[in-house]
Amino acid sequence: FKHALQLVAGKFSDPNAKEDGEVTHFQALTTALSATVGLGNIAGVAVAITLGGPGATFWMIVAGLIGMSSKFVECTLGVKYRRVGEDGEISGGPMYYLSEGLKKRNLGGLGKVLAVLFAILCIGGSFGGGNMFQANQAFQQLSATFPILEGSGIYFGIILAILVGIVIIGGIKSIARVTDKIVPVMAILYVGFSLIIIGMNIGNIGAVLGEIYHGAFNAPALKGGVIGVLILGFRRAAFSNEAGVGSASIAHSASKTNEPVSEGVVALLEPFVDTVVVCTMTALVLVFTGFSDGVSGLDGAELTSAAFESVFPWFKFVLVVAIFLFAFSTMISWSY
């Protein structure tokens, strides 16, 4: 942790060193984080808690901690096998390290097949999880807050597409300049309000932790038992932090460094921030405010919004802004 934070702060960066790459450690981290700290943290966690109960929170945290290892490996490989163009532009990611790395183990044919397969599936992922889910959930929250907008999703989509287009035309440097401002602000805003709600209910902390622990190891058959709750927690963590998916290594490959492992160390902060911190905050707010039992009839981002509103009636307006920024930042990073 200490070394990762020192790398992000630029303690070991030499401004005079000749290093390949287009963005700093911090910008690579915020770009990759902006792709992961999205609606999975707000809507996805609500789905996990509704279906699996508070116990899903425990397994989500476990999956986040394990995910730090897989994120470290994939981002180290991303830098190790990246390609540098004549103009200094970087290309990296699983499609390169699968083909190049496996070729060194005399599995070149398998490597090429897996690389092509990853590229196709990654494009599918960018359309679905990286764009459609984000835009739809953002509009759902917007229209729920401002009913006058219902039925005008097409216009919201067009505006969002134009805004994303303006940023991504400039490539990774342009994306990094936006994400290194949006990500810290939205994460601090969201975590800050969550901590206030937890602080206001601090007397219930023992009961809540007991509920989470009991749900994790003694889940009722109705929720799918312990295995069912474990799977739900792991699925939601993977959807949120993308550890092992390989997508983050595409952004991290553009980092200015000659040491692949240093970027891996920076990258392992992602699942921690995304899942162990932000996702846990959402889960605790849902449990503390009594919205974890799924009886409200709400789902996804609307359920999380209702939980925050029960404490701060005006919070739905703040959450609309947060959800829009979460969605927007995820879309620009996935477009890259």
Image: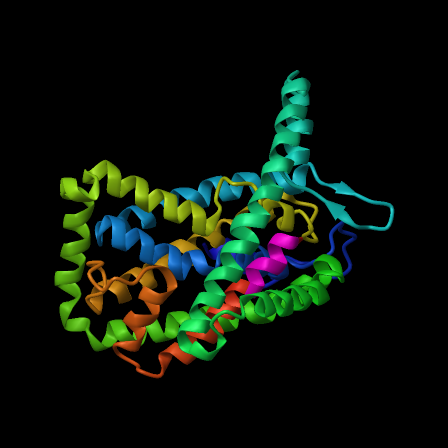
**How would you classify the magenta stretch by its main secondary structure?**
helix
Q: Name the residue at 49% across, 54% down.
A: 270
Q: Name the residue at 74% across, 56% down.
A: 22
The quarter of the displayed image where residue 79 is located: top right
Of all residues shown, which one is farthest toward the top?
Answer: 106
The answer to whether residue 161 shows anywhere in this view is: yes
* Left or right of 107 in this view: 297: left
Of all residues shown, which one is farthest toward the right?
Answer: 86
Give the answer, above or below, for where 189 lies relative to 170.
below
Where residue 319 appears, as percent x and y from the top left, is 42, 74
* Left or right of 43 in this view: 121: right
Give the answer, above or below, for where 221 lies relative to 236.
above
The answer to whether residue 277 shows anywhere in this view is: no
Where residue 179 appears, as percent x and y from the top left, is 60, 65
The stretch in magenta equals 328-335
* Left or right of 102 in this view: 55: left
Of all residues shown, which one is farthest toward the front?
Answer: 151
Report the quarter where the N terminus lies: bottom left
Q: Name the residue at 65% across, 45% down.
A: 259
Tell how many labels.
0
Nearer to me, 279 or 147: 147
Give the answer, above or below, for where 48 lies relative to 185.
above
Where residue 307 appears, as percent x and y from the top left, is 28, 70
Nearer to me, 139 or 277: 139
Nearer to me, 253 or 169: 169
Where residue 193 appears, as percent x and y from the top left, is 35, 75
Q: Name the residue at 49% across, 39% down.
A: 244
**Residue 73 falls inside the magenta stretch:** no
Nearer to me, 321 or 69: 321
Q: How is the image coloured?
A: rainbow
* Left or right of 6 in this view: 63: left
